[in-house]
Amino acid sequence: MTTYAAGQVSILGIFAADLSFRAERLPRIGETLLSSDFAIGAGGKGSNQAVACARSGGQVMLLTCIGRDVFGELALQTWRQACIDTVGIELSDEATGAAFIFVDAANGQNAIIVNPGAARGIDHSFVDRVERYIAASRVFVTQLEQPVEAALRGLEIARVAGVMTVFNPAPAPAVALPEAIWRLCDVVVPNEVEASILTGVEVDGLETAAAAADVLIAKGAGTVIVTLGGNGALLRTATARQHIPAVDAGFLRDTTGAGDAFIGGLCTAIAEGRSLSEAAVFASAVAGLSVTRPGTAASMPTRAEVDRLLSVNARY
């Protein structure tokens, strides 16, 4: 696809080939374990969020860099199948990014190590080259798998253009983010761990999630949505709070990519004109379905599946 339209979501982020290993536990240093399952799939937060957005009904353009290699071909194939606009993709001679994913065989929880590869080319100048696509969007989304300077520049462009900004501060950095970044965010969406690292508030439930959200709002964020896994999410503004319950879609198999599913669904709903509260419920359904399936991009549900799940859960 090479066109874009009003209502589109533009996403600045990386692609990484996911190398997923299922085992009983992580190995110790110097130890080798046998995996009970292995798979190669499409990943990277930016790409995952774009797939989730597109499959749940959004018009989405991904802005990223990939290599001219087999993992780059996997990326292009994934985006074609999801009907993601790729006019904002640049090719690099550096290898496409990759991620090691450990999945706990007992409970589906995961641990991840990412190498961005070619996506290190997502810098200030790259963002300036795709400025027109960001400015033409209704919603702009970014994360922190690419350099923070690129995320900041993207948010600046979106703010000047009057585009709604969604920031997923993941992975949470070891050093403090530039204070200016928070004032450019209409919506910030961290998970429990990220919220804890970014604010110094140990998040272990709704009350502490609200306290962490208050720290980010005090820094300038408009709305904060802290995702809480099986406990849903906490939506917090300067004047109100709301618990968004998790939408149960069945047996939990693999939590990899659940946060990306939530953000992709959230942005689809925002671009359609839904309120943040309604969008968060929709996002919870997208995430709820994603964890019942293995993988990341491959686990993202279709719009029909999301609508059907919400229709049979009247309380949402």
Image (cartoon, rainbow, N blue to C red):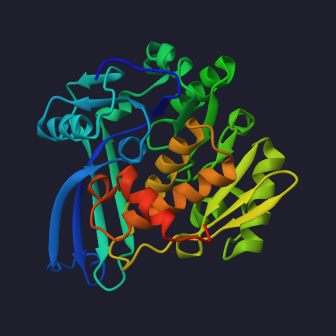
Single out the residue that lies furthest toward the left: 70
For the C terminus, the image quarter is: bottom right
Where is residue 154? Give x, y as percent.
56, 26
Kindly identify the residue that appears in the image at 73 percent across and 48 percent down.
Answer: 223
Where is residue 160? Give x, y as percent.
68, 18
Residue 190 visible in the picture: no
Does residue 214 sit above or below 247 in this rendering? above
For the N terminus, the image quarter is: top left
Kindly identify the residue that appears in the image at 79 percent across and 49 percent down.
Answer: 217
Image-based side of 106 in relation to 315, left or right:
left
Kindly identify the residue that appears in the image at 65 percent across and 18 percent down.
Answer: 161
Instruction: Report the label total.
Output: 0
User: Is residue 118 or residue 250 the one in the foreground?
Assistant: 250
Does residue 151 sit above or below 160 in this rendering? below
Kindly identify the residue that appears in the image at 54 percent across and 55 percent down.
Answer: 282
User: Is residue 57 or residue 267 the one in the foreground?
Assistant: 57
Image-based side of 306 in relation to 70, left or right:
right
Where is residue 308? Give x, y as percent.
42, 62
- Based on the displayed image, in which of its 4 quarters is residue 288 positioned? bottom left
Residue 188 visible in the picture: yes
Image-based side of 57 in relation to 190, left or right:
left
Image-based side of 100 in relation to 205, left or right:
left
Where is residue 268? Give x, y as percent.
50, 42
